[in-house]
Image (cartoon, rainbow, N blue to C red):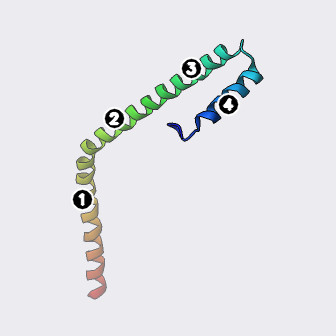
Amino acid sequence: MGPFGFHPLWLVLLLVIVLIIFGPGKLPELGGAIGKGIREFRKTSSELTDEVKTAVTEQPARAPAEAVTEQPARASAEDSTAAKTEQHTT
């Protein structure tokens, strides 16, 4: 088995079929197009990875501020529930 799960014979067979279909004149053009596609994929992938890393590193900085603003809202909801309970018991 080869490094990517392909048997070397299958790789040679695939290259022969591609050579027959596209011909020797188109192979450099086809290889260049494949290389360009791979480069663009890597570039987009690294940009996306950078955006995710940036979002993850910024998130903990915002989390404590959000927690502080949510606490008074919870307290007021608990107070209103307690007030309603007191009204019903009297």
Kind of residue at badge 3: Lys
Q: Is residue 59 above or below residue 37?
A: below
- Real-space CA distance between mark 3 and mark 1, rounded to the nearest whole angstrom: 55 Å
**What residue do we see at 24% from left, 59% from top?**
72
Kind of residue at badge 4: Leu
- Real-space CA distance between mark 3 and mark 4, rounded to the nearest whole angstrom: 21 Å
Report helix, strand or loop for mark 4: helix
* CB under 8 Å between discs 1 and 4: no
Indicate the position of residue 77 as horizontal and vertical percent values: 30, 67
- Residue indicated by mark 3: 36
The disc, 1 or 4, on the residue closer to the chain's N-terminal end is: 4
* CB under 8 Å between discs 1 and 2: no
Kind of residue at badge 1: Pro
Q: Which of the numbered marks, if any, corresponds to residue 72?
A: 1
- Real-space CA distance between mark 4 and mark 2, rounded to the nearest whole angstrom: 42 Å
Q: In this view, does 21 lie above or below 5?
A: above
Residue 6 found in image quarter: top right
Label 2 CA crowd tier, 10 Å (few <14, some 14–19, many 20+): few
Label 4 CA crowd tier, 10 Å (few <14, some 14–19, many 20+): few
- Residue indicated by mark 4: 14
- Real-space CA distance between mark 2 and mark 3, rounded to the nearest whole angstrom: 27 Å
- Residue indicated by mark 2: 54
Label 1 CA crowd tier, 10 Å (few <14, some 14–19, many 20+): few
Indicate the position of residue 39 as horizontal and vertical percent values: 51, 23
